[in-house]
Amino acid sequence: MPTYGSPEDVRKAIEELRDALPGKNRVQTSPESLQVHGSSDHSYHPSCSHSVVVMAHSTDDVVKVVNISRKYRVPITAYGGATSIEGHFTGFPSGSICLDLSAMNSILEINEADGDLRCQPGAKWEDINNTLKDRGIPLFFPLDPGPGATIGGMIGTGCSGTNAVRYGTAKAEWFLNITVVLPSGKVIKTRRRARKSSAGFDTTKLFIGAEGTLGIITEATLRLAPRVPTKVAMAQFPDVEKAVSAVQQILNTPYGPNIQCVELLDDHMMAAINTAGVVDTPYPVQDTLFFKIQGSPESIRDTSNVVQEIVQTHGSTRFEFAATEEEAGEMWENRKYAFFSTLATHPGSKVWTTDVCVPVSRLPQLVYETKEDLAKAGLKSTIVGHVGDGNFHALILFKDEEELRNVGAAVHRLVHRAIQMDGTCTGEHGVGVGKTEYLVEELGEDTVELMKTVKNAIDPLNLFNPGKVRNPTSDGGQR
Amino acid sequence: MPTYGSPEDVRKAIEELRDALPGKNRVQTSPESLQVHGSSDHSYHPSCSHSVVVMAHSTDDVVKVVNISRKYRVPITAYGGATSIEGHFTGFPSGSICLDLSAMNSILEINEADGDLRCQPGAKWEDINNTLKDRGIPLFFPLDPGPGATIGGMIGTGCSGTNAVRYGTAKAEWFLNITVVLPSGKVIKTRRRARKSSAGFDTTKLFIGAEGTLGIITEATLRLAPRVPTKVAMAQFPDVEKAVSAVQQILNTPYGPNIQCVELLDDHMMAAINTAGVVDTPYPVQDTLFFKIQGSPESIRDTSNVVQEIVQTHGSTRFEFAATEEEAGEMWENRKYAFFSTLATHPGSKVWTTDVCVPVSRLPQLVYETKEDLAKAGLKSTIVGHVGDGNFHALILFKDEEELRNVGAAVHRLVHRAIQMDGTCTGEHGVGVGKTEYLVEELGEDTVELMKTVKNAIDPLNLFNPGKVRNPTSDGGQR
């Protein structure tokens, strides 16, 4: 079992970091910086400050920091967009280095003809897409998690977003290769730039979803997709079951691949949107689907006809197709601002956001049971879901410590419910510290043991983001 | 370093296998069976017979065999459709068990609404698709490697096929979860049935492309896609460069996602098709693209207009759109029978098939240099390529041992050329024994070392398909 550095070791490590990375503000120990880098604004898991924050500017910098971390046995946590909501970048009790990669945010190369792009880990997906648009390149990067997420974090959590129903997740083939600094300090590139390769183990995927516990990503080559025109439509239903069965039928038709996104907003969420005042005319308060349909004008027309026909068969009470670009934008924004609408409706409250994912057919039951459970517990909540994937976010409100405990217990019950429906404790937010306790229940002891075997082999000193993904209490404290 | 069982250990292992799997023909040691199971019909790498062939009927059987393999230190190789062309299932010199999973070929469950299917590893992708069609289910499984390939082997090699340009490869998200027997004899299921999960390391992907060196797959849940109508078109060009630049432009338009397949057949391949007599009217002998365009009738019409316009801009001399279903089928068959047409044109010859993959923009140069090199070496060949992915197959003819050596050397040069163009030694056939020597050049020593670290941690006795993926001579014989 590894032992971590003493407070004296941590002090020496910080000294050596200052020597290794000279320059203004490269090595920070101010209470403000440590606090910001140690705890997320949007999660309520137990958190812990780091001992030091280091600003990396290059792969070489990362190697230096990793080598110092190893020399003094001080754990190291990668930090990027800080949008995680499962406590991915909290510090380690015996002292830890927060490696801030947000300044490594350059786009290094765009190969338009080949449809790929090379960038640093701190680049944000929105900035990448804006750059492509500004340069007149007809391509985009389809993974769209929360605003502000960076490529490094998106790889780390195995992210997805609203586009996943059409384009899949980070675990598909959007990362052609990545450059990684290993716990040994060695730098590897997992693959070359060819679109496909069967040359040995899929080492790229080893790091996708590993949450910085196996390596620190310092560069990535992304595959891009052509930008396709879209239109937005909305359908309302008397209940979630009807909405979900409509989605299932639509996705299985030959027009299914034209559905870029299909999002479910429950009646509470629609009420929140109305109350938040982001719409001119309030929507009927019903379970609602928002569609983004892609293709040529004719293809969009045909697809929306099929969608309209199917939602009507499934009892939709209202179907609306955005008439203009502007209306489409507005309609979609309503979905995007779910989090802020939920907050705005309940001044003084905070929101705990969690996500689970189940086979799509199980989603209605999960939604019903969860809403019933939350109501029984006296908790207010809204639900938004990437319904085409069976992925479901609950935004649960609380005002004080007691309600917070109440929320924690409700999330716990929600996760168990999802796992019992052959689902997962997290569809896209990752494990962090918030979901570690569920892995064995979901995957079985031997599958989790396999993860530990891989972790121990690659990071025998358990220095890379310890306590994340694996449950620190399940195997003797430190590992 | 592990040592393998003695001849006496192998004998005892066979005895114990007979006790563990009673019944007719479950444990085979006839020279015919050993020969068939030890060497492929379609590859010319050094091969070696297994000591025994075992027919598995269940996951329990596989566990029994793995435990006996471990007890007597006798290596074990999984065997399914036997369509590999890189020597994946050849035996091990000190004695080995061939675990034949071809009888485990059942479809266990189809969830039409959720669009997934659970099956055993010996199920063939064509049988799965035929079953779905026969049952009136409007879904299909899009990975389409060579005819006869089984799900287990498709996972093992990280396969793809002609549909990859639209649907990606085995390394995308077509396998929701797999059940695997580990070298320890433990049985794990990598994930649940939800479409997405961010719950820890992507252990499914650990086994995709691992060629049976990390675990033996005994079950898989596949994600299905809706069947979409298609039409076939053909475009001919004065040279490969014009053909490839047309493909790049087409794929980057908003109509790009409607291209299900785009295959390149070089002039030699077109000549072979003419000579083989599979067409009524011979084609002009030119570099040719075959397209499969998918969508609704209107969408196909729009897409084919865009394709026609772009290929003409790039100097296409002939564009033909199959008028009827039948004509489309015939046109596509010509691509499918590339291998047999190549053989038929040169009676008495054999064919060495190899594949590499490069960024699409490098493909024309690779094709030119390769054709020039082969001509200089006095070798006849044809070329077919999944041009949308930059993946390229050379089918090189030979008649005797001397020509075979000549072919081996030409393949060696081709692989080096591809790697120098930022490509890979294999786009979809896998490493087997045929491509082991190129991994370090392609990926660097430290990336290969990472693969070894993972292998040693999961299979410390190196009993699972030793000598495949990793170069047996690069690290002291046995490992």
Image: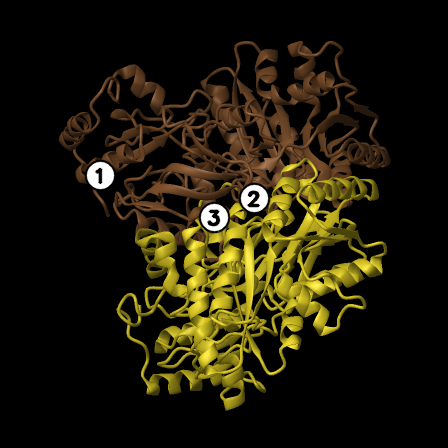
Chain colours: A brown, B yellow
Whole-number angstrom distance, CA of label 3 to CA of label 2 = 17 Å
Q: Which residue is mark 2?
A: A419
Amino acid at circle 2? Ile
Q: Is residue A201 visible?
A: no
Q: Is residue B82 above or below residue A402?
A: below
Amino acid at circle 1? Asn
Residue B313: x and y in percent read 69, 41
Q: Are marks 3 and 2 on the same chain?
A: no
Instruction: Assign a secondary structure to mark 1.
Output: helix
Task: Give the chain letter at badge 2.
Answer: A
**Which residue shows up at 65% across the image and 67% down it?**
B338
Whole-number angstrom distance, CA of label 2 to CA of label 1 = 40 Å
**Which residue shows up at 83% across the image and 44% down it?**
B297
Q: Which residue is mark 3?
A: B202
Determine crowd level at label 3: few under 14, some 14-19, many 20+ residues with C-alpha closer than 10 A. many
**Which residue shows up at 74% across the image and 62% down it?**
B283
Residue B187 has which mark?
none
Q: Nearer the viewer, mark 3 or mark 1?
A: 1
Q: Nearer the viewer, mark 3 or mark 2?
A: 3
Amino acid at circle 3? Asp
Residue A13 as seen in the image, left or right of residue A114? left
Instruction: Assign a secondary structure to mark 3.
Output: loop
Residue A67 has which mark?
1
For marks 2 and 1, the one nearer the N-term is 1
Residue A79 as seen in the image, left or right of residue B60? left
